[in-house]
Image: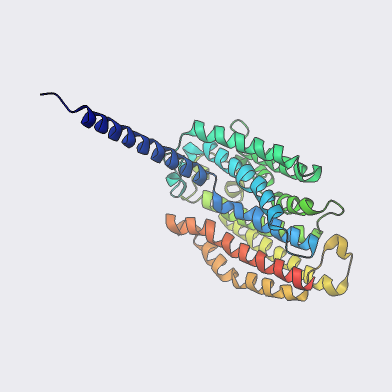
Amino acid sequence: MNSDPGSLDQRRESRLEVVRQETWRGWAKTLWLMVLAMRPPMWLKPLFLMLVAQSYALHDLPYLGTLLYGLLIVGPLLWGGLYALNAVSDIEDDRLHPVKRYRPLASGDLSPRLAAGVSCLAIAAALLLSMRVNGYFALCVAIMAVKQLLYTLPGIRLKEHSPWDIITGSLFNSSLRFSAGWFMVTTASFPPVLMLVLAESLQMAGFLVNRLMTDYSDGLETKLGYRSTVVRYGQRAVRTRIVLLWGLGLLAFAGLIANRFLLFYPSLLGELPVQALWVLGLLILALPAFAGILGRVNRLSPRQAELYYDLPLVYVLLLAVVLSVILKLYH
């Protein structure tokens, strides 16, 4: 008995459609995993720093297109590529980590070769696009890239050695992000010193907490043979430094508000309207929760640890929006 040709064609087309759908699902999953490896929540760091920098420089809310163009370069392309490249370099170490082992590369869900290729393309695109803005902006982007590559790349990996883990992994990163936002809208002056001290202090405190999280599993960095800051000084000393950095950041913020009245080299040091006390108060309100996390960093569940990485960034972004509105209305 002969088969119906029409029926055979339908079955063949049906199988092809199934293959096409599975292929598209596979590509969509790979794309999603690549985005996750590039750590989207961490793009909030350059966003809120560039937002405040541009608001301060303009005395107004920045043009959204300019802000988003800068964020594209400094966030998804530059830092997204750098974070993913770091994850490629850290695969074996991350597989021993109780939180990071579930991430796309450490879990084996994403190809390291693909991730490395996409990361290099993203970083190269960031460097090329930055040159279209201006030289100051491009210099900020280039320095961030070089610092993080020294922190990350196999054969160098300064993240394993104190104090180079702090110098390459954190020092001046916030200043460079802030300055990148600043130089997108003006090259006639430099960012105010106290704003940079504020950004650096809070960034460094957050970075050290991140290093404690990396050492999460009862001295993981010691077991891996690192000679990092946490290994060298111990968790108690690192916690003390975190508290001191938070204090320095709050003092810098208070100094910016006081300088509104003192007017001591305001163009150099910076100044904020008294209404910025709202932001200072909200920062202080967050300290008990921050201290609670810091006190039990080795006892957090994987889900709680992931929330630590994300929620404070959202909180600080909201503060940046509030501060930018205050600068527009009262500066």
Say whether residue 101 is left or right of residue 192. left
Say whether residue 136 is left or right of residue 162. right
Looking at the image, which is closer to me, 204 or 28?
Answer: 28
Name the spot of residue 166 as percent of width and height, x first: 66, 47
Residue at point 57%, 38% (across, down) = 85
Residue at point 73%, 54% (across, down) = 178
Say whether residue 223 is left or right of residue 321. left
| On-image quarter of the C terminus | bottom right
Q: Is residue 329 above or below residue 177?
A: below
Name the spot of residue 180 as percent of width and height, x first: 74, 50
Specify the farthest residue to the top. 2
Question: Which quadrant would residue 81 be assigned to in this image?
Answer: top right
Question: Which quadrant would residue 271 be assigned to in this image?
Answer: bottom right
Q: Is residue 182 visible?
A: yes
Residue at point 78%, 73% (across, down) = 330
Question: Which quadrant would residue 59 be assigned to in this image?
Answer: bottom right
Looking at the image, which is closer to me, 82 or 20?
Answer: 20
Count of marks overlaid on the render: 0
Q: Is residue 150 visible?
A: no
Name the spot of residue 112 as percent of width and height, x first: 49, 33
| On-image quarter of the N terminus | top left
Q: What colouring does the structure picture have? A: rainbow
Q: Is residue 119 above or below residue 68?
A: above
Residue at point 71%, 63% (across, down) = 249
Name the spot of residue 49 as percent of width and height, x first: 69, 57
